[in-house]
Image (cartoon, rainbow, N blue to C red):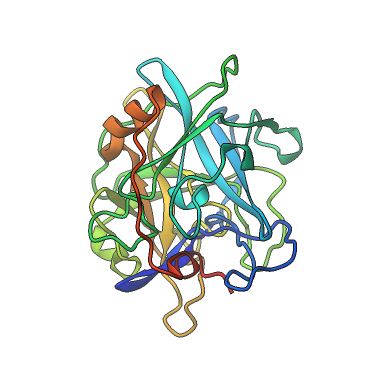
């Protein structure tokens, strides 16, 4: 799995959107890439993971962005958490129309997933395609329709350095892949010192996840979970894939090296509130071309 690139002082790579299908290309954005990273060097899911989700976002005139997401349960409420860059407008960083997003759940097999359309999408007010001065806050919450019941995963505690994690993703399994894998992918690795993600512009409220023997997230893995284990071997959610480093010569995503994950546990309070209530609209100011750089759309 791997992320696409964005620029906020430093060139970084965000798990980007990969083109599933495109109509007539728009002048500024030639195509929509996989919204996030794929797990390269991983393996087929070894267990059900009922909380793992795939996410498709239609961008009219551009195509469909593909990401990964997680069903989370907090204080009795259940919803979807993913990367903000998977569900926001390129020009404003506001949430796209909920009707343009499809969440796929219910299986680790691509051909057995069930489609859900979220009635509401909330984007963290700090998100602005990496152009603001504070934390990147690459985080969004999607509310489940009434009557839809999906098993979620609880948020864990804050993760320190060298904590073992398991990554899940529906992204590419090779850099040149054109289709998602038929089975959800997993990869075991660990958190590492934030300094190892300096090239990706890591900020507060984020985790640095180490690559393991050539394995890392790639296109289509954006928003996908980093899982931790409790003392009772229960899975908990720690973070979601945001971005990785880009090749300094070409600016292209390399799907290699440490990856920045949004630390969902640092945003626990906001996630809880967003699941329960519609949030006030926060006007966002996004520099022209910011999304192009973040997603590395060519």
Observer able to see residue 230: no
Task: State the image quarter where residue 193 is shown.
Answer: bottom left
Q: Position of residue 235 (x, y in %)?
A: 42, 29
What is the tally of numbered marks visible in this picture? Answer: 0
User: Depth check: 166 or 87 in front?
Assistant: 87
Q: Is the residue 92 above or below the residue 182 in the image?
A: below
Farthest-out residue, bottom: 249
What residue is rendered at 68% in x and 52% in y?
180
Give the quarter of the figure containing the C terminus.
Answer: bottom right
Describe residue 173's horizontal placement relative to residue 121 as left or right: right
User: Depth check: 61 or 160 in front?
Assistant: 61
Observer able to see residue 142: yes
What residue is rendered at 52% in x and 55% in y?
36
Q: Is the residue 90 above or below the residue 155 in the image?
A: below
User: Depth check: 33 or 159 in front?
Assistant: 33
Give the quarter of the figure containing the N terminus.
Answer: bottom right
Q: Position of residue 135 (x, y in %)?
A: 26, 54
Q: Position of residue 34 (x, y in %)?
A: 60, 58
Describe residue 118's horizontal placement relative to residue 208 as left or right: right
Q: Position of residue 58 (x, y in %)?
A: 64, 49
User: Depth check: 79 or 175 in front?
Assistant: 79
Q: Is the residue 265 above or below the residue 87 in the image?
A: above
Describe residue 141's horizontal placement relative to residue 206 as left or right: right
């Amino acid at each position: 799995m791997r992320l696409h690139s964005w620029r906020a002082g430093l060139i970084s790579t965000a798990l980007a959107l990969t083109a599933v299908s495109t109509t007539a290309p728009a002048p500024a954005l030639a195509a929509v890439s996989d919204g996030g990273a794929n797990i390269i060097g991983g393996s087929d899911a070894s267990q059900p993971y009922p909380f793992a989700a795939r996410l498709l976002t239609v961008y009219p005139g551009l195509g469909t962005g593909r990401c990964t997401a997680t069903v989370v349960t907090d204080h009795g409420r259940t919803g979807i958490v993913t990367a903000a860059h998977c569900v926001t407008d390129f020009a404003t960083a506001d949430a796209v129309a909920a009707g343009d997003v499809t969440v796929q759940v219910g299986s680790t097999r691509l051909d057995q997933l069930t489609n859900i359309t979220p009635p509401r999408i909330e984007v963290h007010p700090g998100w602005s395609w990496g152009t603001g001065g504070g934390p990147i806050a690459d985080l969004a919450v999607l509310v489940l329709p009434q009557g839809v019941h999906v098993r979620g995963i609880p948020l864990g505690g804050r993760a320190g350095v060298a904590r073992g994690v398991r990554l899940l993703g529906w992204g590419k399994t090779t850099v040149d892949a054109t289709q998602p894998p038929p089975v959800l992918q997993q990869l075991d690795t660990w958190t590492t010192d934030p300094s190892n993600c300096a090239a990706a512009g890591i900020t507060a409220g984020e985790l640095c996840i180490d690559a393991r023997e050539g394995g890392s997230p790639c296109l289509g893995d954006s928003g996908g979970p980093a899982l931790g284990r409790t003392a009772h071997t229960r899975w908990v959610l720690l973070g979601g894939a945001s971005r990785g480093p880009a090749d300094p010569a070409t600016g292209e995503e390399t799907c290699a090296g440490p990856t920045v994950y949004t630390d969902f546990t640092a945003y626990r309070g906001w996630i809880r509130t967003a699941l329960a209530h519609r949030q006030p609209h926060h006007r966002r100011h996004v520099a022209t071309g910011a999304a192009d750089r973040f997603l590395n759309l060519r």
